[in-house]
Image (tube, helix red, strand yellow):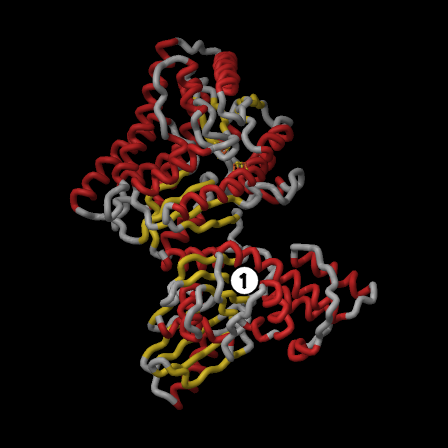
């Protein structure tokens, strides 16, 4: 099938992004580096600044990171740290300040070391989901607002904030549309393309992303009308984020005649699900508080979400994906597996890192799984 | 006749079948590093004696067999093969060189669920081979080493287990006791996999199934008899042909 024009544009934007950022910075724009889907980008946008995701997805920077960090640690954490240490990530180097959060143990403690290399602000994300915790989180979002204002020298006015909320909601709406379109059979877009979109959404200027997504939706509607698309066993991926550089599993699934039709992940639904309803700091905080990350205690809404997505997208099977040493997602996998089995939805659990060494073994498993379902 | 080729990580198996009958088979001590030329030569030799209508490839190195008419994943083949050798089975344990596979299958040999041991070598053929190396025991003599006392090998990791074996040797613990310990640690890795899939009537396949002492210990711990084909190494290959 011919390449989607929107995807070509996306790649192009990505290729020019370094210069674009450079230019924006010269014009006085501040850049905020982020490590997590929990950081409300609305506040950053409302202060006329640019948020960029910094999570590392490459193996290359892991050896330098291991000079300071233990080997048995999540590759995402090591890779991210290594990028800063080796100064090889243009987004990192462009960041004036980096926002961290208290999500998983590994990231939290890594930030303590990273703080020595770059200015950081850490948000306290409570692990419980009760009312008291929400109160803490709202305070944290307020604090972020103050920090952003101080860093940028720009006041976040009500008007500015409203504009930013609407914009990010617009982006979310487009992602919802994309997911609607993926319900079609054959599915009009392959998983690898969608993964790239999520990965680059963390890196590009939001206005650019919105434009590209609008075009994409149109193109896909065309495909659906013509009945064009990808056949294969329909797979939902759930688990750890797959940030730029880490496409291994999706590539493998689609090599062995599967097609990824959904991803319950931070490079997936956790990024866009739920709109911000209202324009106050509290409204914004509430939307982010709902993100069902495995770092939270009693994260049952995630399990419900997976069940719902599996049904809505009419999947043949679920690939539960964890990065090595990611305890939160790995342990939560037991519950997810149990529930999916009860529902009669086949599931396979895959644990891997960023190396290429297990590719053949993973392929064997995925191929057998796809053949089995 | 259909020729099945199973290129495993440490051995290559060839089976020739006419309908449901095994006509000929061969096991070569060379695995995934095998050259395609050698494979072709082996096939030629068979061709000189029998008419081959179709070639099916499976196993870890199945993609090396570029001349195959059909390529099937080994997990799927294994389920089918187990059903070929036995009626009334619902599971398979296969200890191969590279990994250990535990399958739950239905009455037709279709795979319903499976678990493969992870990256780690503990609980695989490789680990056992390594242990034999350190203990300086010849592969062909393994069935001679047996003991009622079992040395404790506590490490779950193959690399650490290796140093544990060496330290046991230096403490003058008899080889057979250490070997029993190696078996035990291997089996202890596999039993949770069996329990997880809740399988009852289990076919035990792969090269390790030829190890009588290990099998006996495995049966005792599972508290049931295992079903072992006469040649446990060709189960997957036969299954590939049957698919
Ligand atoms: S998985 Fe959790 S900690 Fe990681 S980016 Fe997503 S929300 Fe943040
Ligand atoms: S993938 Fe898991 S271990 Fe790694 S940063 Fe995210 S939550 Fe932490």
Measuring 33% from the left and 81% from the top, which residue is drawn there? B19
Give coordinates of residue A119: x percent, y percent. Answer: 58, 23
Q: In this view, does A247 lie above or below A148?
A: below
Residue A148 visible, this angle: no
Label 1 neighbour load within 10 Å: few <14, some 14-19, many 20+: many
Measuring 47% from the left and 20% from the top, which residue is drawn there? A30
**Is residue A266 found left or right of A216 in the rendered image?**
right
| Residue occupied by mark 1 | B99
Q: Is residue A174 above or below residue A252?
A: above
Measuring 39% from the left and 36% from the top, which residue is drawn there? A304
A16, B2: nearer the viewer: B2
Q: In which quarter of the image is residue B125?
A: bottom right
**Is residue A132 found left or right of B161 in the rendered image?**
left
Q: How many marks?
A: 1
Measuring 21% from the left and 48% from the top, which residue is drawn there? A228
Residue A183 visible, this angle: yes
């Amino acid at each position: 099938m011919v390449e989607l024009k929107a995807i070509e544009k996306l790649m192009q934007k990505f290729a020019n992004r370094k210069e674009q950022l450079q230019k924006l910075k010269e014009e006085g724009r501040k850049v905020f580096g982020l490590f997590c889907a929990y950081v409300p980008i609305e506040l950053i946008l409302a202060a006329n600044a640019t948020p960029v995701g910094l999570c590392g997805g490459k193996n290359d920077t892991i050896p330098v990171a291991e000079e300071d960090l233990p080997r048995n640690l999540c590759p995402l954490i090591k890779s991210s740290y290594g990028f800063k240490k080796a100064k090889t990530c243009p987004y990192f180097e462009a960041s004036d300040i980096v926002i961290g959060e208290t999500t998983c143990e590994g990231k939290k403690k890594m930030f303590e070391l990273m703080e020595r290399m770059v200015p950081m602000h850490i948000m306290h994300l409570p692990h419980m989901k009760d009312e008291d915790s929400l109160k803490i989180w709202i305070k944290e979002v307020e604090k972020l607002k103050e920090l952003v204002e101080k860093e940028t020298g720009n006041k976040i006015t009500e008007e500015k904030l409203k504009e930013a909320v609407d914009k990010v909601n617009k982006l979310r709406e487009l992602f919802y549309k994309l997911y609607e379109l993926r319900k079609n059979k054959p599915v009009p877009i392959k998983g690898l393309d969608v993964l790239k979109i999520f990965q680059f959404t963390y890196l590009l200027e939001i206005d650019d992303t919105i434009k590209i997504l609008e075009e994409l939706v149109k193109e896909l509607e065309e495909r659906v009308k013509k009945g064009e698309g990808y056949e294969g066993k329909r797979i939902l991926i759930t688990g750890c984020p797959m940030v730029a550089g880490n496409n291994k599993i999706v590539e493998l699934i689609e090599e062995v005649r599967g097609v990824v039709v959904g991803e319950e992940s931070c490079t997936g639904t956790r990024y866009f699900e739920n709109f911000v309803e209202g324009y106050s700091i509290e409204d914004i905080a509430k939307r982010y508080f709902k993100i069902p990350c495995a770092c939270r205690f009693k994260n049952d809404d995630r399990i419900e979400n997976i069940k719902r997505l599996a049904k809505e997208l009419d999947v043949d099977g679920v690939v539960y994906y964890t990065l090595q040493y990611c305890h939160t997602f790995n342990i939560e996998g037991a519950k997810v597996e149990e529930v999916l089995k009860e529902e009669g939805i086949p599931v396979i659990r895959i644990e891997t890192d960023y190396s290429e060494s297990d590719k053949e073994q993973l392929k064997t498993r995925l191929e057998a799984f796809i053949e089995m379902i | 006749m259909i020729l099945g080729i199973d290129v495993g990580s440490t051995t290559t198996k060839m089976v020739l079948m006419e309908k449901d009958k095994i006509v000929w088979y061969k096991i070569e001590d060379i695995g995934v590093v095998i050259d395609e030329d050698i494979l072709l030569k082996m096939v030629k030799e068979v061709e000189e004696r029998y008419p081959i209508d179709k070639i099916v490839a499976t196993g870890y190195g199945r993609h090396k067999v570029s001349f195959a008419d059909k390529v099937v994943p080994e997990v799927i083949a294994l389920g089918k093969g187990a059903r070929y050798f036995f009626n009334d089975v619902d599971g398979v344990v296969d200890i191969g060189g590279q990994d250990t596979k535990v399958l739950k299958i239905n009455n037709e040999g279709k795979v319903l669920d499976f678990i493969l041991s992870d990256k780690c070598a503990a609980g695989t053929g490789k680990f056992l081979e390594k242990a034999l190396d350190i203990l300086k025991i010849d592969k062909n003599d393994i069935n001679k080493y047996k003991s009622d006392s079992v040395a404790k090998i506590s490490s779950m990791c193959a690399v650490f287990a290796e140093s544990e074996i060496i330290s046991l040797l230096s403490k003058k613990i008899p080889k057979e006791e250490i070997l029993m310990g190696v078996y035990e640690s291997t089996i202890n890795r596999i039993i949770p996999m069996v329990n997880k899939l809740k399988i009852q009537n289990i076919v035990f396949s792969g090269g390790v199934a030829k190890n009588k002492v290990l099998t006996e210990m495995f049966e005792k711990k599972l508290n049931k008899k295992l079903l072992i084909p006469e040649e446990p190494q060709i189960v997957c290959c036969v299954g590939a042909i049957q698919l």
